Amino acid sequence: MQHRFYALISRMRYIGRWGLMRNTFEENVQEHSHMVAVLAHGLAMIQRDILKEPADPDRCAAAALFHDASEILTGDLPTPIKYYNPEIRNAYKAVEAITSRKLLSMLPPELQPGYEPLLTESDEAVHRIVKAADKLSAYIKCIEELKAGNSEFESAARQTAQALEEMDLPCLRWFMDHCLESFRLNLDQLE
């Protein structure tokens, strides 16, 4: 029997993000998931090693790699639609849960328990860090677009910055205070 899970995961690269926005450079779900994994790992390291609070960086990174896996089957629903009202948000969450279960069913039964918490975001501490990393990745995309002169992202940048502030997560606050401004620099300034 051939298990289709990994072949479907590889198709993340075909799903574009920011579909309603004019982009200076395109971003797909695979690229986004990689950045979210890097950020989630970093946030968890900050929480564990700087703030001395419990966190599992490896688990956060792995969960982040799969946090949008359901979009392989659903596509990327634009944020203004996804969060338009509670009914749509709840319906979309139900669709995500169903598609996550479908993806799990495409794995050998022996692997399903290991992937289930990654696809269903069942660990609240991990979910919180991945959610922060996801929002942080969106904000970094806004910064990069604004740096390129694309004013299309001004409103998204404001809304995303406000959402980050409202998360009230100490490791996120530390990252924003000590790392975020470097995303506004050019390559020569980074060296």
Image (spheres, helix red, strand yellow):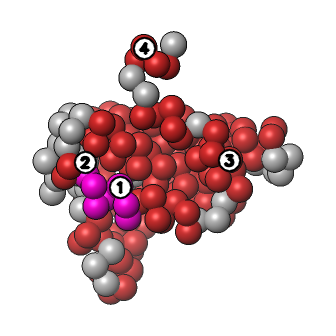
User: Quick one: 93 or 180, which is closer to the camera?
Assistant: 180
Specify the principal SS of the magenta part: helix
Question: Which callout, 1 or 4, points at the residue further toward the start of the chain?
Answer: 1
Q: Which mark is residue 157?
A: 1
Q: What amino acid type should be assigned to the residue bearing mark 1? A: Ala
* Circle nearer the viewer, 3 or 4: 4
Earlier-in-chain disc, 3 versus 4: 3
Image-based side of 115 in relation to 67, left or right: right
Label 3: which secondary element: helix
- Residues tagged 3 and 2 counted as in contact (Cβ below 8 A): no
Task: Classify residue 35 as left or right of residue 56.
Answer: left
Q: Which quadrant holds the N terminus?
A: top left
**Dot label at residue 174:** 3
Q: Position of residue 28 (x, y in %)?
A: 27, 39
Q: Which amino acid type is shown beneath numbered disc 4?
A: Asp
Q: Amino acid at mark 2?
A: Arg
Q: Gap between marks 1 and 4, in whole Å?
A: 24 Å
Mark 4 lies on residue: 188
Q: Residue at x 46, y 19 (%)?
A: 189
Q: Earlier in the sequence, mark 3 or mark 2?
A: 2
The circle drawn on residue 15 is none
Q: Which residue is mark 2?
A: 17
Residue at x 58%, y 47% (from the top left corner) = 176
Element carrying mark 1: helix
